[in-house]
Amino acid sequence: MTGMKTGTKADDGRRQGKAVDPLGPNSEIGRKLKQYYDDLVSEEVPDRFAQLLAQLEHAKPAGKKD
Amino acid sequence: MTVSQGFKADLLASIPSLRAFAVSLAQNADKADDLVQETLVKAWDKHESFQPGTNLKAWLFTILRNEFYSQMRKRGREVQDSDGIMTARLAVHPAQQGRLDLEDFRSALEHLPEDQREAIILIGASGFSYEEAAEICGCAVGTIKSRVSRARARLQDILKISGDDEFGPDAIATHVIGSSAA
């Protein structure tokens, strides 16, 4: 698996100050963590949130309650 | 003062990340979406306290996290009552050839204490620096580091991954490569 090292070295160079990255691409945990999270991030966002922001925008145009 | 269109657009763009973080914290999709909703309302109300040019995502994550812990306190931690069920579900088979099922990973993550889970998510998945994560969690950088390292050790333990078996350079080799490259 020495072939992996070359790619990793370049990665480490880009992320200076994080030379030892225990959650980097060489770590099974690190890779799973990103996969887990990226799956969540790429989920479709329900309409309720856009609607909520539209409501907020129209509810308090002056940004004041009193 | 009205909320600017730019701020609204930035909020909209942050929703996927907020949902991912919320699910990671709450481990429940419905609760997560309620958290996101609450976060958006709070962010909207306090938009004037956001300093343009600073990290909006970190600001929003801080709000969401505070909301999560305040809800948890109100509920008397009923969220974490399922330890028995959790353990039963954790009949995880060892990683084969470094491959690991995402479902197994998910349940292992669920098994971490919240402080460790949030730390490893912020650092390992959300792309925050240790400094930013410390700010979000309101603790010292060293605390985040130790939580991340405990979380990682615990996950490896649950998933029966030994650090040495991971392919690629081990920690020491990485360190050597890192320092010679720097």
Image (tube, coloured by chain):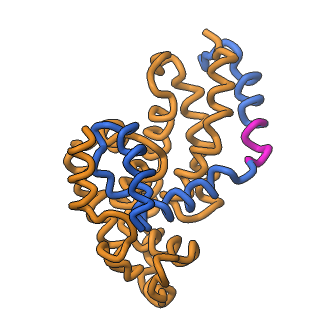
User: Which region shows up in magenta?
Assistant: A45-50
Q: Colour of chain A?
A: blue
Q: Nearer the viewer, residue B102 or B78?
A: B102
Residue B76 at least partly seen: no
Q: Colour of chain B?
A: orange
**Is residue B176 rendered to the left or right of residue B168?**
left
Magenta stretch contains residue A15: no
Q: Quadrant of the N terminus of chain B?
A: top right
Figure label count: 0
Who's the residue at 42% across and 45% down the image?
A: A11
Is A10 situated left or right of B178 in this image? Answer: right
Which residue: 41% across, 61% down? A26
Which percent across, then down, holds residue A53? 72, 31
Q: Is residue B84 left or right of residue B101?
A: left
Instruction: Give whichever of B137, A13 is nearer the camera.
Output: A13
Looking at the picture, how far across and down is residue A38, in whole percent?
A: 60, 54
Image height of B65 relative to B12, above or below: below
Q: Main secondary structure of the magenta part?
A: helix
**Residue at the spot 67% in from the left edge and 24% down from the top edge:** B8
Residue B31 located left or right of residue B66? right
Please provide percent x and percent y for residue A66.
Answer: 59, 17
Q: Residue at the location (22% across, 50% down)?
A: B143
Name the foreground residue: B25 vs B90.
B90
Q: List x then y, in percent, for residue B173.
A: 24, 60
Q: Quadrant of the C terminus of chain B?
A: top left
